[in-house]
Amino acid sequence: MVSPAALPPLPFNPSRVRSYLLRLPLFTRLVVLVIILFWLLELQTVWSVVQWGSLIPDEIGLSTMYRLNTYPVIHTGFFHTFINLLAVTPLLERFEAEHGTLTAIALFIGPLSTLPAGIYLVIEKFILHSNTAVAGASVWAFLLLGSESIRTFKSNPYFSLGNYKIPTWTSPLFACVLVWILVPNTSFLGHLCSVLIGYLLGLGYLKFFVPPEKILRWIEGKLNLLGRLPHYVSVDQKTYGRYGVLPTAGAPGGERGTPMSFLGGSSMALKSSIRKLRNNPQFLFIRLPYILSFLCIVAGVVWLFLLPLDDYSRKNYISENALLPGQVHAYFSGSEQHIFRGYKKELEGLLGNEGSEEGQKNEERTPVISDKIQSILRAAGLKVATQEYEYTSSGISHRGENIYAIIQAPRGDATEAIVLVAAWKTVNGELNLNGVTLALTLARYFKRWSLWSKDIIFVLPPDSKTGTQAWIDAYHDMQPSTVQPLPLKSGALQGGLVIEYPFNHRFENLHIVYDGVNGQLPNLDIFNTAVSIAGGQMGIGTRLQEMWEHNGSYEKRLQTMLRGMVKQGFGYATGAHSSFMPYHIDAITLQTHGNGWQDEMALGRTVEGLTRSLNNLLEHLHQSFFFYLLMQTHRFVSIGTYLPSAMLIAGNFTIMAIALWLRTGYSQGSPNVIAATNDEKTSEKSPLTSPDKADSVEQETTNKAAERQLALPLSLVVGLHLLGLIPLYIFNNLSHGNYTLATLISIVTNALLPLLLAALLSRNSTTTQQTHLIKSLSLLLLGLFLSTLATLNFSLSFMIGLLCAPLSFVHRISAETAPVLRYTLSIAGLVFLNILSPPVVLLAGCAYFGVSVETVLMEAAFGWDVWGMWTQVVVWCVWWPTWVVGGALVGVSLF
Amino acid sequence: MPVDRRKAAVFGGALALRLLLLILFPSLPDLLTGRVEVSTPVTSFKRLQEGLFLYNRNVSPYDGGVFHQAPLLLPIFSLLPDAQEYPLPTALFYSLVDLLNANALVTISDSAQAVSGRLYSSIRKGIKWDGSVVAAWFLFNPFTIATCLGRSTGVFTSTGILYALSAAVQGQTLNSMLALGLASHLSIYPALLFIPLVLLCYDRQAERTGTTPSTALFVVKHLAVFLSSIAGLLGISLLIIGDFSTLLSATYGFQLLVPDLTPNIGLWWYFFIEIFDSFRDFFLGVFWLHLTAYAGSLTVRLRRQPLFVVTSLLGIFAVFKPYPSISDASLYFSLLPLYRHYFPLMRYTFFSVSALLYASLLGPAFYHLWIYAGSGNANFFYAITLVWSLGLSLTIADTIFAALRDEWEQENPDKRGKTVKQV
């Protein structure tokens, strides 16, 4: 049996510990089990086991006498449990082996628990008048130590320390003092009481508690306990030996093997399989990685589902002191409402002047309206400028004209600015008349205040998708040639607010949209400020992720989080604010929702409060989190808590890649007959171990270092990743009419490409090593990309990781498998993989959300062209190549 | 001849790939030029252009404190048309320099000095890649391509070093010293390669003539050549610049005293940002001493394989020099394929390659989070540069282990293939 060189020898011999543990007698086992059970029970929060069972002097009454017996098996925490178990197990094992199981039960359930407790209670309650609760098996440990020390004293009465002779029976007392000093929260008195009882036991004064041997023997004989119970220690050791049977030389491999024990066979199988695991490189390299990978995926998913719990999410808080949300009085009310109505009338009057003959109002922003808006802003005393832009994507042209105006800060030096955006059309394409009017009113209102220390820029784009992008690009001189540069600029932008009020009635609550392009998020402080000003100061409820009814339950939190993750993962712009995020400008959209009693003035006051808070900022928002998942308006999970779930999923691919790499380093030689050991020979007799037999044959092959042939795997994997650029280019540059057709073609191509590759691979007689290497490299790259992606866009990495998860487990089916089975398996595998191919997932997703493929792909191409979104790069250059490799490897088994 | 055809295919393919990338992604060179991983303060093409602008207008290129490269580059680059308007000639020039480097590599590989020299020849000399494969590893290495497209002037230093090596293995010892002089003039650190290189020259000389001339005399003679070549280049530089003290402080002073702490993939910048100013001089000395210490000690330990010492030293420089970039790493990786016969002895290939891959992906991501997204901070990027350095150090340590193991197996033929444990 050759164990791989990578495994260092263990510093101690685990087989000894194992055999010791396997030989533990019955009662000791039970005690250990009960102690562990109670510790596990304590983990839940509903019922406090410690409160129920520990020895609390004031709680002891007639009905709570049970505490006198339960306290030794109850512990307060993991370390308490662990250390006490370590201390008690050997002592108890010795006691039981010496006195028999029945005696041990009788003594430990009865007097040896209650007597120390009784003494402790009397001293604690009636002499010291205090109420210290005690629990734990240490009482038994000290008791047994006490009785042992008396026995030692009889044979070996003194330690000699120089001239002094110290009686050996004092050793438990020393231990008691040491423990009291070294370990916090230990009851010195409790330990002392138990040592005392231990002395009495050792001196033989407690013998009368021991049930008469005659009765015990009668019980034992009647019930045939020796035959029925495994690990049972008989009263009469002279007849049956220490463990019920005298050890014989013939007992195999140190196994106790009680002849009367019915369960002996299975324990034997268990033991040999454990031993096999240790010496089995085949298991380490082939089985274990699959198990580990699977566990990683499961742990990653479970982790995600734990996040909404109170223990994992945190309450939101304002981290930046300068924000002072809601600390100022908002004066936007009263006469400003008349101004608002006036502006609205003027704009409404111009609305649809041109389209009126159709009976339906034309809601487009016409040049007349533009002029009106500019004249209003000019009249209010702002500097106004316009910017024209045009974008072309999927053969559709998007053009428009941004109007923007700047209030120069009376108390600033034009180095910093805040942006207020009111698009003519909301992100859903509705007319945002109230929003634009409110922005105009606020512009006039803000201009008259002298407290601004930052410039305020009002941007009025014609729509929510292109306008702000063109404006912000031009603001930073990063615009494409089809976008005009800005004639008027201000300082560095510190924050942005988008106002959307797309209906004419009053609203009930505010919907805060915060997702940016490519899953980037604004600083959590700006979101918290909005929630606290709207909710705390104005009394307006806030909602997020379109969760209109949110009662704070687990399901609702999970739903909110998942919706947020989907948006983040797709990485598209969710509103006019999204375009600000790539430039490190924190921005949110405030959408009005519902039918309630809040009017435009309330929204205006909220915006005023938020602007005042942003105006207070001394430096860019940096205090709070940039990576978070929101569950509720006032609960979030930070990156440190959620990142492991995506990393675990990415890690599963890396584990698999490393395992496959290690596996390719060994070539399998001829079966080695000598390696078969006695253990396997004996275990072959047991019917339970027959499935393991195949393994043992496999395992007996010698492993040699093998040279890896990297040229083909390397060029295949790298080539496929580069090939991904072709569909990326095609899908981003198609005209909008062809998208559905292109998707169908790509589905067919995807079904055929792996087969083609598989045919090529098998024609070149690819070795097993090479297929392993192909898979290893491809998974290594996948793990690499996903873990990098997880730091940039957690949700996308998580989703792609889950969709790719089966690729860790599919592989070329060995040519030695029966052909029928092989063909069925590989065809089933291919069908399954095709269901998970990128275009099929896209179709399924579209069907589930009820949108057409064309819309989605158009949006994606638009995102690529305008917003700089790179979700599709991840799909085509990370996911797709790995998928093709997986499909090809399954396909190879067909040829 | 079939071998030549292969070489031509590799060279042609590499040239085509570079031009194709340039034509397909016209913005790629400018993007790469701005990356801190590619361009350091002493090799940046942007800074060179600044110096060129000043030079062409008869202003001292060192005015303004941006340009810190050797003045020799200025007349060469002023011959080329403006890179902003006509990127193709510059790209072509850099591609040709890459091909020259590859050619030098082919010469080194064909001399078979890596597998068997005068004092030592490996027991595994059968395992070897021929020159065109070595050239392909160099030319198609993404790091080399990025350096070439990023137009880092570090490639000229690489050319100097590689030509010094190729001349040395051919026995042209004077040429070798002159080339090393050029490399050292461009960026000081190659001067540390003098000791192993002169030993390599000595070995080749002895091998060819069959005599063993006096070592001391040989070294002194070549040191004189080396120093006079540097002096000659400095003289030419002086003709270009005119002011000797400005020249020295702006080029050598800048390289030695490390005043510019722009982030790079090395270990110095973060340390010197964090350190109190009063300790700066001391630690500057310590860092330089640390870097120079390797040259002597490795030469002593691996005296019989001077070419391997040069290779390992280049790897060590790529980790520990003040302004490292991926061009230094690519130089090291270009020499590694010469030691194909050590690969079976290496133990951590997969892990060091994975670490390097992770670092080269996560590095730009974390830099983005720090500088552009503002959601990370400097520690993100620094942590990744540590991983990168760890990956490189692992590779270096692993190859040195393999070399020592090979020597040991030759000395103890009975222990071949047995596992060893250090005690």
Image (spheres, coloured by chain):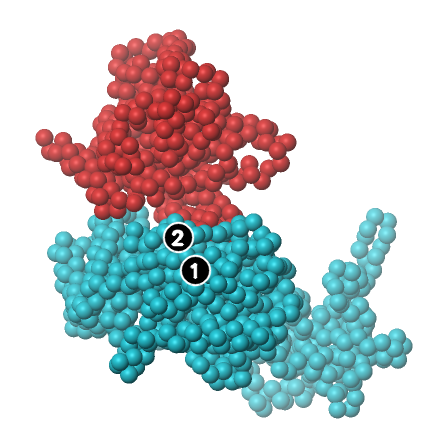
**Which residue is depicted at the point 40% across and 51% down?**
A487
Chain seen in cyan: A
**Which residue is depicted at the point 32% across and 20% down?**
B179
In the picture of the structure, the residue carrying the numbered disc 1 is A404
Q: Tell me where residue A757 appears, x and y as whole percent.
A: 17, 59
Q: Quick one: quadrant of the N terminus of chain B? A: top left
Element class at badge 1 = strand
Q: Amino acid at mark 2?
A: Leu
Chain seen in red: B
Number of the label disc, if any, that sits on residue A12: none
**Which residue is depicted at the point 26% across and 33% down?**
B90
Q: Is residue B293 above or below residue A4?
A: above
Please give the chain letter of the residue carrying mark 2.
A
| Most foreground residue, A843 or A534 | A534
Q: Is residue B346 above or below residue A432?
A: above
Residue A390, located in which quarter of the rendered image?
Answer: bottom left
Element class at badge 2 = loop
Q: Amino acid at mark 1?
A: Tyr
- Taking the view exactly as shown, the residue that stands out farthest to the right is A127
Q: Residues within 10 Å of mark 1 (few under 14, many from 20)?
A: many
- Say if mark 1 contacts mark 2, CB within 8 Å: yes
Q: Residues within 10 Å of mark 2 (few under 14, many from 20)?
A: many
In the picture of the structure, the residue carrying the numbered disc 2 is A486
Q: Tell me where residue A864 appears, x and y as whole percent.
A: 30, 59
